[in-house]
Amino acid sequence: MAREFQEHIKGTLDTPFGEMSFALTSADHVYLSSKTIGEFVVNRVPYYSVSLHLNRLSDGSWARSGFSDPYMTRGQDPHEVSRAAREKAYEGIRASWEAFIAGQDMDIPLMEAELSNLNNEIRRVDEELVTARGTVVELERHREELLEQERRVRAQAGAFTRRGGYPRTQDWSPKGRVPEELQ
Protein backbone atom coordinates (compact mmCIF):
# COMPACT_ATOMS: atom_id res chain seq x y z
CA MET A 1 0.00 0.00 0.00
CA ALA A 2 1.37 3.42 -0.96
CA ARG A 3 2.20 5.79 1.85
CA GLU A 4 0.55 9.18 2.10
CA PHE A 5 2.66 12.31 2.49
CA GLN A 6 2.47 13.55 6.07
CA GLU A 7 2.55 17.26 6.75
CA HIS A 8 5.06 18.66 9.21
CA ILE A 9 3.92 19.79 12.64
CA LYS A 10 3.31 23.51 12.27
CA GLY A 11 2.66 26.40 14.60
CA THR A 12 3.54 29.99 15.44
CA LEU A 13 6.18 31.46 17.69
CA ASP A 14 6.40 34.94 19.21
CA THR A 15 9.89 36.45 19.02
CA PRO A 16 11.22 39.85 20.10
CA PHE A 17 11.08 40.87 16.41
CA GLY A 18 7.64 39.63 15.40
CA GLU A 19 5.62 36.49 14.95
CA MET A 20 7.14 33.54 13.08
CA SER A 21 5.76 30.31 11.68
CA PHE A 22 7.53 27.07 12.42
CA ALA A 23 7.54 23.57 10.97
CA LEU A 24 9.02 20.66 12.90
CA THR A 25 10.42 18.58 10.06
CA SER A 26 12.02 15.94 12.30
CA ALA A 27 12.85 15.40 15.96
CA ASP A 28 16.03 17.42 15.58
CA HIS A 29 15.17 20.08 12.98
CA VAL A 30 12.82 23.03 12.89
CA TYR A 31 12.31 25.56 10.11
CA LEU A 32 11.16 29.04 11.19
CA SER A 33 10.06 31.87 8.89
CA SER A 34 8.58 35.32 9.31
CA LYS A 35 4.82 35.13 9.24
CA THR A 36 4.01 38.53 7.79
CA ILE A 37 6.00 40.32 5.13
CA GLY A 38 7.75 43.52 6.15
CA GLU A 39 6.85 43.44 9.83
CA PHE A 40 9.94 41.69 11.17
CA VAL A 41 12.05 44.49 12.69
CA VAL A 42 15.67 44.12 13.88
CA ASN A 43 17.64 47.19 15.05
CA ARG A 44 14.78 49.43 13.87
CA VAL A 45 15.09 48.08 10.30
CA PRO A 46 12.11 46.24 8.77
CA TYR A 47 12.95 43.07 6.88
CA TYR A 48 10.95 41.68 4.00
CA SER A 49 11.45 38.10 5.12
CA VAL A 50 13.45 36.12 7.65
CA SER A 51 13.96 32.37 7.83
CA LEU A 52 16.07 30.13 9.99
CA HIS A 53 16.86 26.42 10.31
CA LEU A 54 17.66 25.17 13.80
CA ASN A 55 19.08 21.73 14.58
CA ARG A 56 18.85 20.12 18.00
CA LEU A 57 22.23 19.26 19.46
CA SER A 58 23.01 16.23 21.62
CA ASP A 59 22.77 18.37 24.79
CA GLY A 60 19.19 19.39 23.87
CA SER A 61 20.05 22.95 22.83
CA TRP A 62 19.30 24.26 19.35
CA ALA A 63 21.78 25.82 16.90
CA ARG A 64 21.67 27.24 13.40
CA SER A 65 22.26 24.95 10.44
CA GLY A 66 24.64 27.21 8.57
CA PHE A 67 26.67 30.39 8.69
CA SER A 68 24.11 32.35 6.66
CA ASP A 69 21.24 31.50 9.02
CA PRO A 70 19.08 33.38 9.53
CA TYR A 71 18.42 34.28 5.92
CA MET A 72 17.12 37.86 5.82
CA THR A 73 16.03 40.16 2.98
CA ARG A 74 15.19 43.83 2.98
CA GLY A 75 12.81 43.87 0.01
CA GLN A 76 13.75 46.43 -2.62
CA ASP A 77 16.61 47.83 -0.53
CA PRO A 78 19.85 46.67 -2.15
CA HIS A 79 21.90 47.02 1.05
CA GLU A 80 23.41 43.90 2.55
CA VAL A 81 22.01 42.66 5.82
CA SER A 82 24.51 43.49 8.57
CA ARG A 83 26.18 40.69 10.49
CA ALA A 84 25.04 42.39 13.71
CA ALA A 85 21.38 42.26 12.60
CA ARG A 86 21.77 38.64 11.53
CA GLU A 87 23.35 37.68 14.88
CA LYS A 88 20.75 39.60 16.89
CA ALA A 89 17.93 37.92 14.96
CA TYR A 90 19.53 34.49 15.40
CA GLU A 91 20.02 34.88 19.14
CA GLY A 92 16.51 36.26 19.66
CA ILE A 93 14.79 33.60 17.54
CA ARG A 94 16.84 30.75 19.05
CA ALA A 95 16.14 31.96 22.60
CA SER A 96 12.43 32.28 21.78
CA TRP A 97 12.37 28.75 20.32
CA GLU A 98 14.22 27.24 23.29
CA ALA A 99 11.86 29.03 25.72
CA PHE A 100 8.87 27.76 23.71
CA ILE A 101 10.21 24.19 23.76
CA ALA A 102 10.97 24.39 27.49
CA GLY A 103 7.44 25.60 28.25
CA GLN A 104 5.79 22.74 26.35
CA ASP A 105 5.65 19.00 26.72
CA MET A 106 7.42 18.44 23.40
CA ASP A 107 8.33 14.75 23.66
CA ILE A 108 5.25 13.58 21.76
CA PRO A 109 5.31 16.34 19.08
CA LEU A 110 9.04 15.70 18.48
CA MET A 111 8.41 11.95 18.12
CA GLU A 112 5.47 12.66 15.80
CA ALA A 113 7.70 14.97 13.75
CA GLU A 114 10.33 12.23 13.50
CA LEU A 115 7.71 9.64 12.49
CA SER A 116 6.38 12.04 9.86
CA ASN A 117 9.91 12.62 8.59
CA LEU A 118 10.62 8.88 8.45
CA ASN A 119 7.29 8.21 6.70
CA ASN A 120 8.04 10.84 4.05
CA GLU A 121 11.58 9.54 3.59
CA ILE A 122 10.29 5.95 3.18
CA ARG A 123 7.71 7.26 0.71
CA ARG A 124 10.46 9.00 -1.29
CA VAL A 125 12.60 5.82 -1.32
CA ASP A 126 9.57 3.75 -2.40
CA GLU A 127 9.07 6.11 -5.35
CA GLU A 128 12.76 5.81 -6.25
CA LEU A 129 12.49 2.00 -6.07
CA VAL A 130 9.56 2.02 -8.51
CA THR A 131 11.63 4.14 -10.89
CA ALA A 132 14.69 1.92 -10.40
CA ARG A 133 12.68 -1.25 -11.01
CA GLY A 134 11.36 0.23 -14.23
CA THR A 135 14.92 1.09 -15.23
CA VAL A 136 16.08 -2.47 -14.43
CA VAL A 137 13.28 -3.94 -16.55
CA GLU A 138 14.20 -1.64 -19.43
CA LEU A 139 17.90 -2.50 -19.10
CA GLU A 140 17.14 -6.24 -19.03
CA ARG A 141 15.03 -5.87 -22.20
CA HIS A 142 17.83 -3.92 -23.90
CA ARG A 143 20.38 -6.55 -22.78
CA GLU A 144 18.25 -9.33 -24.31
CA GLU A 145 18.12 -7.41 -27.60
CA LEU A 146 21.91 -7.06 -27.56
CA LEU A 147 22.38 -10.75 -26.75
CA GLU A 148 20.08 -11.65 -29.68
CA GLN A 149 22.12 -9.41 -32.00
CA GLU A 150 25.31 -11.06 -30.74
CA ARG A 151 23.84 -14.56 -31.45
CA ARG A 152 22.98 -13.51 -35.03
CA VAL A 153 26.47 -12.09 -35.64
CA ARG A 154 28.10 -15.25 -34.20
CA ALA A 155 25.88 -17.37 -36.46
CA GLN A 156 27.03 -15.36 -39.49
CA ALA A 157 30.65 -15.76 -38.37
CA GLY A 158 30.12 -19.54 -38.11
CA ALA A 159 28.66 -19.63 -41.62
CA PHE A 160 31.73 -17.81 -42.99
CA THR A 161 34.03 -20.26 -41.23
CA ARG A 162 32.18 -23.29 -42.69
CA ARG A 163 32.61 -21.85 -46.21
CA GLY A 164 36.37 -21.54 -45.83
CA GLY A 165 36.86 -18.52 -43.65
CA TYR A 166 36.25 -14.85 -43.90
CA PRO A 167 36.40 -13.24 -47.33
CA ARG A 168 39.58 -11.39 -48.29
CA THR A 169 39.87 -7.80 -47.24
CA GLN A 170 38.79 -5.44 -49.98
CA ASP A 171 39.80 -1.84 -50.46
CA TRP A 172 36.68 0.11 -51.16
CA SER A 173 38.60 3.32 -51.62
CA PRO A 174 38.99 4.83 -55.09
CA LYS A 175 42.66 3.79 -55.16
CA GLY A 176 41.74 0.29 -56.01
CA ARG A 177 43.83 -2.29 -54.19
CA VAL A 178 44.84 -3.44 -50.72
CA PRO A 179 48.50 -2.93 -49.73
CA GLU A 180 50.44 -6.22 -49.45
CA GLU A 181 51.15 -5.83 -45.72
CA LEU A 182 47.39 -5.78 -45.00
CA GLN A 183 46.62 -8.90 -47.03
Image (cartoon, rainbow, N blue to C red):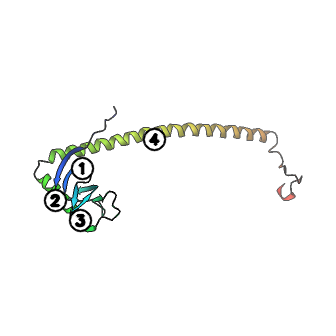
Secondary element under disc 3, as helix, strand or loop, is helix
Residue 95: image tag: 2
Q: Which one is nearer the viewer's eye here, 137 or 13?
A: 13
The quarter of the rendered structure image containing the N terminus is top left
The answer to whether residue 131 is above or below residue 97 is: above
**Residue at x-position 31% and y-position 62%:** 68
Secondary element under disc 1, as helix, strand or loop, is loop
Secondary element under disc 4, as helix, strand or loop, is helix
Q: Which residue is mark 4?
A: 132
Please, what is the three-letter code of the amino acid marked with disc 1?
Thr
- Does the residue at mark 4 contact the one at mark 1 (Cβ under 8 Å)? no
Q: Residues within 10 Å of mark 1 (few under 14, many from 20)?
A: some
**Residue at x-position 27% and y-position 58%:** 47
Q: Is residue 172 left or right of residue 3?
A: right
Q: Residues within 10 Å of mark 3 (few under 14, many from 20)?
A: some
Q: Earlier in the sequence, mark 3 or mark 4?
A: 3
Residue 56 visible? The answer is no
Secondary element under disc 2, as helix, strand or loop, is helix
- Does the residue at mark 3 contact the one at mark 1 (Cβ under 8 Å)? no
Q: Residues within 10 Å of mark 4 (few under 14, many from 20)?
A: few
Q: Which one is nearer the viewer's eye here, 85 or 13?
A: 85
Instruction: Measure how far apart labels 2 and 1 are at the Cα level.
Output: 20 Å
Residue 127: image tag: none
Residue 151 occupies which quadrant of the picture?
top right
**Residue at x-position 19% and y-position 62%:** 91
Comparing labels 2 and 1, the label whose residue is closer to the camera = 1
Please, what is the three-letter code of the amino acid marked with disc 2?
Ala
Residue 87: image tag: 3
Q: Earlier in the sequence, mark 4 or mark 2?
A: 2
**Residue 113, how many percent across, how many down?**
23, 45
- Does the residue at mark 4 contact the one at mark 2 (Cβ under 8 Å)? no
